[in-house]
Image: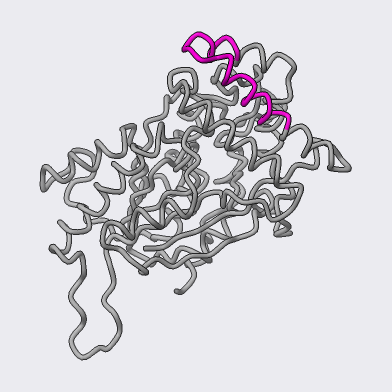
């Protein structure tokens, strides 16, 4: 696949004071997901829009990006889960040391408004809606309420799968995406081949996913991996309490692969594992260096108050005597892994990134 056109529109004036930050750097997104000029892109879970602005530059003046996210526009840097430290920095919106000084957007709404006011804003339509419901409404009418007459060429989910409330909600979204593909290009979901060519026909919309690999390539990544499982277990145990947490449904690449294979999409996906890059723009490409997501997630479970808070929630729903020791063991595994790192929790690295194009 060809790389994206160079986003020459991404000047410092556009990016500042947004402070773009992503587990996959903008360069990685450009290299992995081929988005041609004129593409009509549906981005699911854009958050503050760090990937959205890169996509807007890539599609050019004849393209469009519909960015659908159900998040509260007032959502800001402090995580809202009951097991999160007050003021803890969240995955999608980095807390800034001095917002008053930098003038940086702090909330989801402020960040999106900043992008809309820039020179690429006219190519972007931020839509606050449940993604599956948005797609259902599009399928129910030939003219969707938010993006009239648009046949999407690409659908992107960049680090948004784990934000869904459950694997069932992710499966619901995938169902809608495959139905969208069938509706746009017939029951086979394929665009007719150009007469005289021998290449395989393309699929539209192309489904592009980037998500944590749910594997530890190094010891420094192990705490982040263990924490993801612990967060996922807590979210499953008490979905209401977990609402607002960064990790709610940590599905694996294998789960995604098996889901599509079970729905007639066998051996069609192109996969790749990318080392978690540094903060966007640094260019050093070292695994996990410069990223703080893993550190923040792990720190939340290192607090002494954590066990007491969890015990209250778990025991309130029954069988706490058997479940609390299990949770304590999971937390101990995180602490032991951190203890084996020379730099302690500050040496924790993010997991690598799994990418999938279907």
Coloration mode: one colour
Q: Is residue 154 left or right of residue 190?
A: right
Rendered position, 127 above or below 355: above
User: Which percent across, then down, holds residue 266?
Assistant: 33, 66
* Position in image of residue 118 (x %, y %): 47, 43
Q: Position of residue 326 (x, y in %)?
A: 62, 26
Q: Residue at x 46, y 42 (%)?
A: 160
Residue 281 falls inside the magenta stretch? no
The magenta span reads 311-332
Furthest residue in direction front, as rendered: 322
Image quadrant for the N terminus? Answer: bottom left
In this rendering, is residue 67 above or below 299?
below
Counting from the top left corner in percent of width and height, residue 43 is at 38, 48
310 or 201, which is in the foreground? 310
Q: Is residue 229 above or below residue 300?
A: below
Q: Quadrant of residue 172?
A: top left
- The image quarter containing residue 228 is top right
The majority secondary structure of the magenta stretch comes to: helix
**Quadrant location of the C terminus in the rendered image:** bottom left
Considering every residue shown, the one lying at the far right of the view is 342
Q: Nearer the viewer, residue 235 or 134?
A: 235
From the viewer's perspective, tell me whether residue 124 is left or right of residue 251: left
Tell me the residue at 53%/66% (across/down). 31
Magenta-span inclusion, residue 314: yes
Among all residues in the image, which is located at the extreme bottom?
196
Residue 276 seen in the current view:
yes
Looking at the image, the residue that sits furthest to the left is: 141
Instruction: Write the residue at 49% across / 24% down.
Output: 244
């Amino acid at each position: 696949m060809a790389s994206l056109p160079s986003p020459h529109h991404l000047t410092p004036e556009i990016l500042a004071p947004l402070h773009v930050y992503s587990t996959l750097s903008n360069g990685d997104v450009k290299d992995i997901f081929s988005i041609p000029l004129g593409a009509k892109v549906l981005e699911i879970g854009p958050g503050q829009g760090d990937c959205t602005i890169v996509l807007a530059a890539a599609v050019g003046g004849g393209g469009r990006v519909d960015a659908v996210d159900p998040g509260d526009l007032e959502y800001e840097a402090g995580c809202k889960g009951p097991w999160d430290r007050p003021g803890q920095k969240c995955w999608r919106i980095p807390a800034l040391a001095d917002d008053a000084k930098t003038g940086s957007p702090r909330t989801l709404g402020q960040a999106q408004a900043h992008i809309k006011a820039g020179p690429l804003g006219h190519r972007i339509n931020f839509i606050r809606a449940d993604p599956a419901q948005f797609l259902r409404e599009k399928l129910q009418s030939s003219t969707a309420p938010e993006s009239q007459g648009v046949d999407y060429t690409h659908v992107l989910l960049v680090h948004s799968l784990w934000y869904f409330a459950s694997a069932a909600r992710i499966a619901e979204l995938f169902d809608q995406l495959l139905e969208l593909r069938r509706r746009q290009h017939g029951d086979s979901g394929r665009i007719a081949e150009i007469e005289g060519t021998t290449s395989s026909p393309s699929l539209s919309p192309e489904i592009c996913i980037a998500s944590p690999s749910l594997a530890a390539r190094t010891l420094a990544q192990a705490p982040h991996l263990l924490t993801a499982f612990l967060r996922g277990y807590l979210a499953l145990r008490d979905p209401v309490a977990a609402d607002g947490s960064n990790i709610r449904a940590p599905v694996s690449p294998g789960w995604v692969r098996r889901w599509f294979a079970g729905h007639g999409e066998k051996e069609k996906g192109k996969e790749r594992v990318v080392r978690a890059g540094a903060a966007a723009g640094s260019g050093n490409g070292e695994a996990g260096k410069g990223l703080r997501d893993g550190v923040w997630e792990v720190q939340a479970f290192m607090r002494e108050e954590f066990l007491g808070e969890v015990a209250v929630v778990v025991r309130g729903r029954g069988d706490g005597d058997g479940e609390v020791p299990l949770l304590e063991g999971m937390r101990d595994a995180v602490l032991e892994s951190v203890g084996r790192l020379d730099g302690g929790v500050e040496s924790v690295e993010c997991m690598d990134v799994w990418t999938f194009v279907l």
